[in-house]
Amino acid sequence: MPTHAAAYRVERLVVGDAPVAKTLFSMMADVFEEKDDPLSDEYVARLLAREGLWVLAATSGDEIVGGLTAHTLPMTRSESREIFIYDIAVQADHQRRGVGRLLMSHLRRLASDAGIHDVFVPADDDDAHALEFYRALGGVASPVTFFTFGREP
């Protein structure tokens, strides 16, 4: 098993990578211990065709061990964009080996190449591991509360 980030590879998934993406999305749901519905090839192909969706897969050999999904948000106060990281997950047996850091740095490098310099990610206040991880990467916490809404009653 790899012991440092150099043993891992990260790539952005694109149209044509639907089988890899489906495996990645399922792996991420497993890491989060969430139920996941089977996704059709057509649905995943449409997702990957979206220019504003970032899907990164971290692999060790042929095994997907981590991933990240993010969305580009166009701003209205300037002609700029920011990236909202929606999910980042690493299989338990590959955590604390630099995979998450590699995913984040890869996204930031790709975003910078695209002229996007602001990246943000929400973290639950009670998720000490995530808070520690983002702070270790140089992230600065913002005093923001997210509200979620379900279906209309």
Image (cartoon, rainbow, N blue to C red):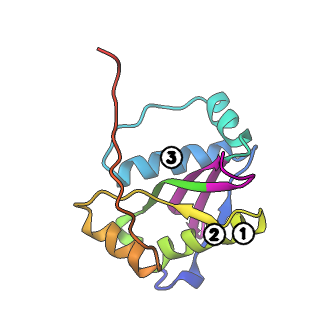
Is 56 positioned to the left or the right of 65 in the image?
A: right
Residue named by callout 1: 112
As drawn, which residue projects farthest toward the front?
77
- Asked whether the residues under the numbered discs 1 and 2 touch, taking CB atoms below 8 Å apart as contact, a structural biologist would say yes
Q: Camera-side residue: 76 or 56?
A: 76
- Asked whether the residues under the numbered discs 1 and 3 touch, taking CB atoms below 8 Å apart as contact, a structural biologist would say no
Residue named by callout 2: 108
As drawn, which residue projects farthest toward the top?
153
Q: Residue at x 66, y 50 (%)?
A: 77
Whether residue 60 is situated above or below residue 121 in the rendered picture: below
Estimate the x, y position of residue 120 in percent, counting from the top left: 51, 61
Q: Residue at x 61, y 58 (%)?
A: 56
Q: Camera-side residue: 144 or 58?
A: 144
Mark 2 residue element? helix
**Rendered-image quadrant of the C terminus:** top left
Mark 3 residue element? helix
- Mark toward the viewer: 1 or 3: 1
- Type of amino acid at the residue the image marks with label 3: Phe
Mark 1 residue element? helix
> Which contiguous range is marked in magenta?
53-82
Q: Residue at x 36, y 59 (%)?
A: 123
- Type of amino acid at the residue the image marks with label 2: Arg
Whether residue 121 is situated above or below residue 41 in the rendered picture: below
Residue named by callout 3: 25
Specify whether residue 61 is painted magenta: yes
Q: Camera-side residue: 83 or 5?
A: 83
Q: Earlier in the sequence, mark 2 or mark 3?
A: 3
Whether residue 149 is situated above or below residue 1 in the rendered picture: above
As drawn, which residue projects farthest toward the left?
126
Q: How far is mark 2 from mark 3, CA to CA?
A: 21 Å
Specify whether residue 29 is painted magenta: no
Q: How far is mark 1 from mark 3, CA to CA?
A: 25 Å
